[in-house]
């Protein structure tokens, strides 16, 4: 096998490999788009309503700071 034949074979394998990867990516993009449209049409992309009252309440940073401060104070008293 000459060097020219080896270059020709390597070029064919390179094109074949790149074509396979390109085809896989193309099929994957199509599948993702189809699943996205299916999810949207079934209404599964809507945000679920909160299950309890505490999930709807926004965390107040002053309440969190007070809770952390109280926990640290208790910890220091016991140690």
Image: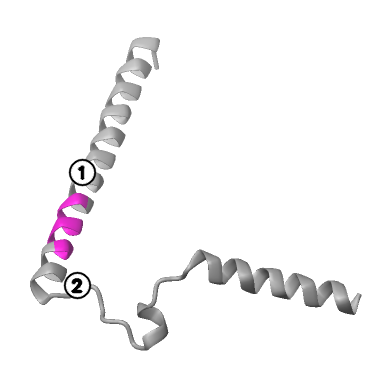
Report x, y in % for residue 71: 72, 75
Please state which of residues 62 and 21 is positioned toward the viewer in this rendering: 62
Q: Which is nearer the N-term, disc 2 or disc 1?
A: 1
Look at the picture and state if 61 lies above or below 1.
Answer: below
Please give the label number shown on residue 69: none
Look at the picture and state if 6 lies above or below 21.
Answer: above
User: Residue visible at 39% across and 80% down?
Assistant: 55
Look at the picture and state if 58 lies above or below 20.
Answer: below
The residue pinned by badge 2 equals: 46
Which residue range is magenta in the image? 29-36
User: Residue visible at 24% across and 73% down?
Assistant: 47
The residue pinned by badge 1 equals: 23
Look at the picture and state if 2 lies above or below 18.
Answer: above
Task: Report the mark closest to the observer, 2 or 1.
Answer: 2
Report x, y in % for residue 52: 37, 88
Report x, y in % for residue 21: 28, 41
Please state which of residues 53 and 13 is positioned toward the viewer in this rendering: 53
Is residue 30 found left or right of 15 in the rendered image? left
The image quadrant where one finds the N terminus is top left
Inspect the magenta stretch and tell me whether residue 34 lies in it.
yes
The image's colour scheme reads one colour
The image quadrant where one finds the C terminus is bottom right
Please state which of residues 55 and 68 is positioned toward the viewer in this rendering: 68
Q: Residue at the far left: name it.
A: 41
Is residue 36 found left or right of 21 in the rendered image? left
Please state which of residues 78 and 5 is positioned toward the viewer in this rendering: 78
Assess disc 2: are there few (<14), some (14-19) or many (≥20) residues with their C-alpha within 10 Å of its C-alpha. few
> CA gap, disc 2 to disc 1?
32 Å
Q: Quadrant of residue 37?
A: bottom left
């Amino acid at each position: 096998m000459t060097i020219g034949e080896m270059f020709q074979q390597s070029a064919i394998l390179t094109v074949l490999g790149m074509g396979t990867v390109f085809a896989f990516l193309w099929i994957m993009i199509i599948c993702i788009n189809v699943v996205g449209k299916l999810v949207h049409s079934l209404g599964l992309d809507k945000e679920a309503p909160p299950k309890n009252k505490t999930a709807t309440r926004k965390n107040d940073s002053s309440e969190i700071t007070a809770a952390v401060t109280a926990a640290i104070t208790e910890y220091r008293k016991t140690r």
